[in-house]
């Protein structure tokens, strides 16, 4: 097969969709533009299926397709090709992006059918796919950075899609500015790595990564990877830059599903996995990543406990799950991170689309306190959401169980991990089970709390079909990574397919202790049991004993206040960073710009003007005056000559 | 030099003094007056002041070149007066006045 052509089609199909819809956004109807955009995404999906099967057909050691399109930058010894690379690692990514992307495009046709700007929406969505594909297929850091910025732009455009609402426009701005902080660090990371290794090519960087770990905090690899990680915290919403993601829910719900759950926010995780040998060479960075990851997982889950907006709960849940992925990266379990990235893309996209279906049915109502009893009205949405719920709280044999338990197990067993990581991870899982059950209970179960005038109805097939497909994937998606201890029990002894597939893309953890089956069972059993208990507790609390939440809230009033106000993080940022920055800018403007620079230029200009005014009087166009000057001049010259 | 002789005996200096006095009068007229005819007359005065100094030098140095020069100057003065007066007539025809400021109208 012609690989350059296939990759070009894969990447360019969404771009062409974007151009068609984007240039005719006033003329194309919602349906036409939706079908156009969806077919572009589906075409990309088919091409990526072909490409991935090509990858499969290659022998295991050489599963790699490299395509160089043209030389992009050539300055002295610095050369960057506009090149793409496909290997097992990003073949999973492109399947997720184009597959889940196509489903979400399809869902959007129904969701956006009443919107006047639908063509523009689909154009942005296609542009996003294009940039995301560049990001994951790039074979060097600079091309990746192009995609990295592109997805940020699309995220901004789509969050602020309903920009007439100034709050939504502000949410878009917040996302963009927060990401910019991360992107600046990402660029610094690229610079440091380039200074150290003299290349930005992934293959060269990975090959040049030293086998001896760098101990110092100030070594070039540690610094470079730390900066790259700060970039990842921006894009993947980790502490301290996670604040934009919950606000990003202002965008249309399918966008939240595609960009802010399944694909874009995982870019940071993907970047770390892509450069895993480099990160492994910097144990300090690994420790930072693991700590930030597990903290984010717990803190975001805590905040999620008391949110009332259905999308905000899911947003905090996304932040928390991304925290797990970073925890996995931090303890060196890159395969587990990619595995969780994939299963999370399935079940979180499913839940976001489900919440979109709920919001659509409830006529734009997002407050879970005003829902309830929707199981009766939205049977398909409920059934699919139920599977997503089982997946995210980690019940076997649904997808989330395998990936989350691999992460938790690795955080315990890996030489980079320890029991504290595991305990915090399990605590996060307990919180996850609690808030997701609360969401289910308040939304779908119990008595209806909305007015009688509202008649919720099930969504059209374009919306329920993606839900069903994603529910299926959430149920079985985890089976490609069944751990050995469970595989041995099952009939046919299924191998851990994913681990084998990624064998040559990801460095194994050195001196990983031989896992003992009893230990693994114990770890799994504990987390599943605790999560189940927590879910049961939430079920009791919100359905059987509805007076409990209020009682608990009264009892722990200060704590309740703190958590329901999201730990006042936004307020702290506002007062400690944003306001001082604004004041500083104002002062610089007033004292440097207005008073110093402006005034200096005024003085200079006044001086020139004054001189000009004086000289202007002399040159008045009157021949007699000129004759006078000439005479005066002659007299002066003569007198000087005579005086000598 | 500052004796009675200076008053009784007319010499080169006296002619030169006269010449410069006339020249300065003429120059003042050219620079200060607005009436074009007066300016023309003043120019005539300056030319004649120069003529006096030419003749005086020629006489005291016993050379004829200065006097020949005077003829040239007179010729040119006559020509200049003819041209100048012609312009002035046309200016007068148009503006009913011969103020020098109207000459600005000759600008392209």
Image (cartoon, coloured by chain):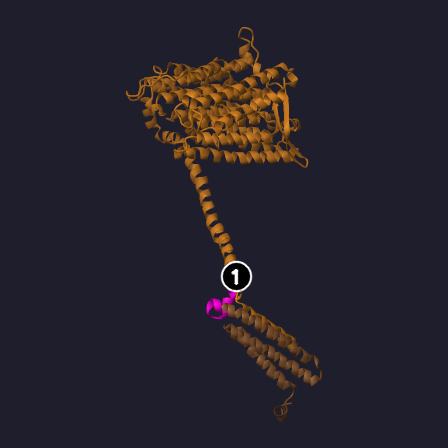
Chain colours: A orange, B brown
Residue B30 appears in view: yes
Name the residue beneath numbered marker 1: A612
Q: Is residue A486 above or below residue A306?
A: above
Residue B107 located within the stretch drawn in magenta? yes
Task: Locate residue A374, reporting x and y percent.
Answer: 35, 17
Tag 1 secondary structure: helix
Q: Which residues are magenta?
A: B92-108
Q: Please give the count of numbered marks on the rendered protein.
A: 1
- Residue A401 is left or right of residue A500, and the answer is left
Which of the two residues, A124 or A90, is positioned nearer the viewer here?
Answer: A124
- Residue A347 is left or right of residue A47, and the answer is left
Residue A635 appears in view: no
Task: Locate residue A244, reporting x and y percent.
Answer: 45, 32
Task: Locate residue A465, reporting x and y percent.
Answer: 44, 15
Looking at the rendered image, the quarter that the N terminus of chain A falls into is top right
Residue A149 located within the stretch drawn in magenta? no
Residue extending farthest to the left is: A452
- Residue A632 is left or right of residue A244, and the answer is right
Task: Locate residue A418, reporting x and y percent.
Answer: 54, 24
Q: Quadrant of residue A556?
A: top left
Q: Quadrant of residue A637?
A: bottom right
């Amino acid at each position: 097969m012609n690989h350059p052509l296939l990759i070009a089609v894969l990447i360019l199909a969404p771009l062409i969709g974007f151009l068609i819809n984007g240039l005719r956004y006033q003329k194309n109807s919602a349906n036409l533009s939706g079908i156009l955009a969806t077919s572009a995404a589906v075409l990309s999906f088919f091409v990526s299926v072909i490409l991935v099967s090509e990858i499969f057909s290659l022998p295991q050691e050489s599963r790699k397709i490299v395509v160089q399109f043209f030389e992009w930058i050539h300055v002295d010894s610095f050369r960057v090709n506009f090149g793409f690379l496909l290997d097992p690692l990003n073949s999973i990514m492109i399947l997720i992006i184009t597959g889940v992307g196509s489903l979400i495009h399809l869902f959007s046709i129904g969701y956006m059918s009443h919107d006047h700007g639908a063509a523009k929406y689909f154009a942005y969505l296609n542009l996003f796919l294009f940039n995301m594909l560049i990001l994951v297929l790039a074979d060097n850091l600079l091309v990746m950075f192009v995609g990295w910025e592109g997805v940020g732009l699309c995220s901004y455009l789509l969050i602020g899609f309903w920009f007439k609402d100034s709050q939504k426009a502000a949410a878009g701005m917040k996302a963009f500015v927060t990401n910019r902080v991360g992107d600046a660090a990402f660029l610094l990371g690229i610079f440091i790595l380039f200074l150290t290794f003299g290349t930005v090519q992934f293959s060269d960087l990975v090959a040049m990564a030293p086998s001896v770990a760098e101990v110092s905090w100030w070594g070039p690899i540690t610094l470079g990877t730390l900066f790259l990680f700060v970039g990842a915290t921006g894009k993947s919403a980790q502490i301290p830059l996670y604040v934009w993601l919950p606000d990003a829910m202002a965008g249309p719900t399918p966008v939240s599903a595609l960009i802010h759950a399944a694909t874009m926010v995982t870019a940071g995780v993907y970047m770390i996995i892509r450069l895993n040998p480099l990160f492994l060479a910097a144990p300090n960075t690994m420790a930072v990543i693991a700590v930030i990851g597990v903290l984010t997982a717990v803190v975001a889950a805590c905040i999620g406990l008391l949110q009332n907006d259905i999308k905000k709960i899911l947003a905090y849940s996304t932040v928390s799950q991304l925290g797990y992925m970073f925890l996995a990266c931090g303890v060196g379990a890159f395969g587990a991170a990619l595995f969780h990235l994939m299963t999370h893309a399935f079940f979180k996209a499913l839940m976001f689309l489900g919440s979109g279906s709920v919001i659509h049915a409830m006529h734009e109502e997002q407050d879970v306190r005003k829902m309830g009893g929707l199981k009766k009205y939205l049977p398909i949405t409920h059934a699919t959401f139920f599977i997503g719920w089982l997946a995210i709280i980690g019940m076997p044999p649904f997808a989330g169980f395998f990936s989350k338990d691999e992460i938790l197990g690795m955080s315990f067993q890996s030489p980079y991990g320890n029991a504290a990581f595991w305990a915090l991870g399990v605590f996060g899982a307990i919180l996850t089970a609690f808030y997701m059950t609360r969401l289910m209970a308040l939304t779908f179960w119990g008595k209806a709390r909305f007015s009688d005038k509202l008649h919720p109805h099930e969504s059209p097939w374009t919306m329920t079909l993606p839900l069903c497909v994603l529910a299926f994937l959430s149920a079985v998606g985890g089976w490609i990574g069944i751990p050995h201890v469970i595989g041995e029990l099952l009939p046919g002894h299924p191998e851990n397919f994913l681990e084998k597939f990624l064998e040559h893309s990801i460095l194994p953890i050195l001196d990983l202790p031989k896992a003992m089956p009893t230990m693994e069972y114990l770890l799994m059993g504990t987390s599943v049991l605790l999560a189940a208990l927590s879910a049961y507790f939430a079920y009791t609390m919100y359905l059987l004993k509805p007076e409990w939440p209020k009682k608990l809230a009264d009892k722990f009033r200060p704590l309740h206040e703190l958590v329901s106000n999201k730990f006042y993080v936004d307020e702290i940022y506002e007062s400690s960073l944003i306001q001082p920055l604004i004041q500083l800018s104002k002062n610089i403007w007033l004292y440097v710009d207005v008073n110093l620079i402006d005034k200096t230029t005024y003085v200079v200009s006044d001086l020139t003007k004054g001189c000009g005014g004086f000289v202007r009087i002399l040159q008045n166009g009157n021949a007699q005056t000129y004759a006078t000057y000439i005479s005066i001049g002659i007299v002066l010259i003569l007198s000087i000559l005579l005086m000598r | 030099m500052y004796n009675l002789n200076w008053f009784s005996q007319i010499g080169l200096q006296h002619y030169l003094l006269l010449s410069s006095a006339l020249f300065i009068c003429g120059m003042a007229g050219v620079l200060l007056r607005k009436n074009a005819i007066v300016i023309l007359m003043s120019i005539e005065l300056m030319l004649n002041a120069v003529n006096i100094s030419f003749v005086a030098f020629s006489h005291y140095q016993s050379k004829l070149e200065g006097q020949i020069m005077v003829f040239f100057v007179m010729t040119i003065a006559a020509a200049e007066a003819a041209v100048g007066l012609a312009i002035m007539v046309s200016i007068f025809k148009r503006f009913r006045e011969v103020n020098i400021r109207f000459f600005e109208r000759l600008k392209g």
